Amino acid sequence: MRYLKFVVLLAAIFALINISYSQVKIGWINSQVIMDKLPEAQEAQRQLDNLVTEWQNELAKMQNEWQRKFEEYDKRKLILTEQGRADAERQLQELDKKIVEYRNRKFGQNGELFQKQNELMKPVQDKIFKAIQDVAKEEGYDYVFDKSGDILLMYTNEKYDLTNIVLEKVKTFKR
């Protein structure tokens, strides 16, 4: 009986050792490289850049107008009446408020830029994520890390770089 318990215990230990030594296959990609090489990502980025330039130009016009009005006020404030100074200061404050509101509306945390970026980039990101999943399943990877993200990889073996495989997979998807 003792011998049987010993054999069962030994078999259990070997089974656990085999399970713990099973291979986990890990790969990595550089999503920034994929984004840089995808035409639809480049087009989305071009559209975003154009919008940002347009909005920055409008913001610069507003700031220049504020600066011009301030300089005009500063030159004339000594000869303005109390009411004239108050009106000019009120106009400057209103214009400053419009500038801040415009900046927040366009570039704020949930501003138009953020929304437009989500609208344009989400389909591209979805395609990339789908390609990553497909490649990982087809190639038998358990984990795929993104080297360009916040995860710090101190060492990467180039033979596990899936970036080009994922890029090719994304290119095969219908637009």
Image: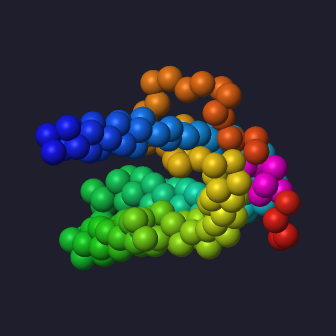
Question: Relative to 95, does residue 162 appear above or below in the rendering?
Answer: above
Task: Count the numbered circles shown.
Answer: 0
Q: Closer to the camera, 119 or 138?
A: 138
Q: Can you say which quadrant of the picture contains the C terminus?
A: bottom right
Q: Can you say which quadrant of the picture contains the N terminus?
A: top left
Q: Residue 132 at what x, y percent from top left?
A: 65, 54
Q: Closer to the camera, 77 or 111?
A: 111
Residue positioned 24% across, 76% down in the render:
83
Residue positioned 27% across, 39% down in the render:
7
Relative horizontal placement of residue 141, taking residue 139 as reference (left or right): left
Q: Residue 172 at what x, y percent from top left?
A: 85, 60
Q: Which residues are magenta?
A: 166-171
Residue reaching furthest to the left: 2
Relative horizontal placement of residue 137, taking residue 64 as reference (left or right): right
Q: Closer to the camera, 100 or 157?
A: 157
Residue positioned 50% across, 23% down in the render:
155
Answer whether residue 20 is visible to the viewer in this image: no
Q: Closer to the camera, 127 or 101?
A: 127
Task: Examine the structure image and report whether residue 112 is included in the region drawn in magenta.
Answer: no
User: Which scheme is used to colour this image of the protein?
Assistant: rainbow
Task: Examine the structure image and report whether residue 167 is included in the region drawn in magenta.
Answer: yes
Question: In terms of image quadrants, where is residue 122?
Answer: bottom right
Q: Residue 59 at what x, y percent from top left?
A: 53, 61
Q: Magenta stretch mostly in which secondary structure? A: helix
